[in-house]
Amino acid sequence: MERNGGYARGRATRQVVLAEALRLFGEVGYRSATLRELAARCGLSHPGLLHHFPSKAALLQAVLEERDVVEGARAGAVGATGVAHLRALLRIARASAAAPGLVELFAVLSAEAGAPDHPAHDFFVRRYARLRAELTTAFREAAEDGLLRPGVDPVSAAVLLTACWDGLQVQWLHDRDSVDVAAGLEAALRLLVDLDG
């Protein structure tokens, strides 16, 4: 019985650490955040934090994975198909504007992680492959529903939309008053599909 209780407490602590790390990374960035500061915020000792996440790199990967899960669930992307899935992406983009630190973290890390020895390299390789596959499926479903614009290839549309989203986020980080990521993403999507269908 104690073993199950300990396991449940461990999972609960892990979730608290992930949520607090997401906030801390969003506030000060990955490089400036320290594990000691995070441990203090979570009410843990530094060794206690290391019990759950043995390194800052392991924590980073878990935080990035958690961010994708939480945002997808919050926006209704999980289980959505076709144009409904694409609309959910717009909700994610709108929500991201409220967390500029996280957008910055993601944009910087995705660029830095191009180096094969970066701790987040494998995460981003898998993430981009998964995102392109999900978008390709959504565009194919939109085509089946008669909502894909004529001449649009689902595979190419997935690559272009991913690049558009990343590029808009980088531009927004440089000029938040002039660039609206969600509006730009919606404009790009409307060139590819009938969002109102």
Image: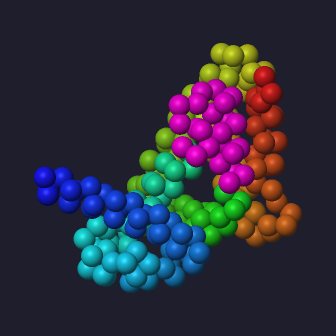
Closer to the camera in the image, 68 or 147: 68
Q: Characterize the magenta stretch by its predominant secondary structure.
A: helix
Left or right of 6: which side holds 142?
right
Left or right of 121: which side holds 2?
left
Tell me where residue 146 appears, x and y as whole percent. 73, 16
Q: How many marks?
A: 0
Left or right of 127: which side holds 89?
right
Q: Which residue is at 64% across, 26% downward?
A: 82
Closer to the camera in the image, 59 or 187: 59
Tell me where residue 169 appears, x and y as whole percent. 70, 59
Q: Which residues, given as a range, are shown in magenta?
A: 73-95
Closer to the camera in the image, 42 or 184: 42
Work out whether residue 134 can be spotted: yes
Q: Is residue 84 magenta?
A: yes
Task: Establish if 75 lies above or below 119.
Answer: above
Tell me where residue 35 appears, x and y as whole percent. 39, 79
Farthest residue to the right: give it: 178
Q: Is residue 21 magenta?
A: no
Q: Which residue is at 13% across, 52% downward?
A: 1
Quadrant including the C terminus: top right
